[in-house]
Image: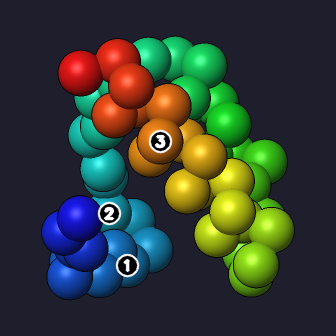
């Protein structure tokens, strides 16, 4: 898995593509181990769709 290196700043606009349910999940995802696990599950789910 690749990791992004871009850093956003206040006022930046970011365009993302994806399923709306997955994007909405990002709003509530917490930082730390819980968020890391949620990310892992999302990646596994996405890989299952490919």
Direction from residue 43 to residue 14 in the image, left or right = left
Against 10, residue 23 (above or below) is above
Q: Is mark 1 on a helix, strand or loop?
A: loop
Direction from residue 50 to residue 18 in the image, left or right = right
Against 49, residue 28 (above or below) is below
Q: Residue at x 34, y 34 (%)?
A: 47
| Residue with the mark numbered 1 | 9
Against 11, residue 33 (above or below) is below
Q: What element carries label 2?
A: loop
Q: Residue 44 carries which label?
A: 3
Direction from residue 23 to residue 3 in the image, left or right = left
The quadrant where residue 11 appears: bottom left
Q: Is mark 3 on a helix, strand or loop?
A: helix
Q: In which quarter of the image is the N terminus?
A: bottom left
Assess whether mark 3 and mark 1 are in contact (beta carbons under 8 angstroms): no
Q: Disc 3 or 2, which lies upstream in sequence?
A: 2
| Residue with the mark numbered 2 | 12
Q: How crowded is mark 2: few (under 14 residues within 10 Å), some or many (20 or more)?
A: few
Marks 1 and 3, how far apart at CA: 29 Å
Direction from residue 25 to residue 34 in the image, left or right = right
Assess whether mark 1 and mark 2 are in contact (beta carbons under 8 angstroms): yes
Q: Residue at x 69, y 46 (%)?
A: 27
Indicate the position of residue 7 as horizontal and vertical percent values.
29, 81
Q: Which residue is drawn at 57% across and 56% down?
A: 39
Q: Disc 1 or 3, which lies upstream in sequence?
A: 1
Indicate the position of residue 33 as horizontal and vertical percent values.
76, 78
Q: Which of marks 3 and 2 is in front?
A: 3
Q: Nearer the viewer, mark 1 or mark 3?
A: 3
* Total numbered circles: 3
Marks 3 and 2, how far apart at CA: 29 Å
């Amino acid at each position: 898995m690749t990791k992004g290196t871009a850093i956003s700043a206040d006022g930046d606009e970011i365009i993302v593509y994806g399923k709306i349910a997955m994007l909405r999940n990002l709003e509530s995802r917490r930082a730390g181990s819980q968020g890391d696990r949620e990310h892992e599950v999302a990646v596994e789910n996405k890989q299952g769709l490919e």
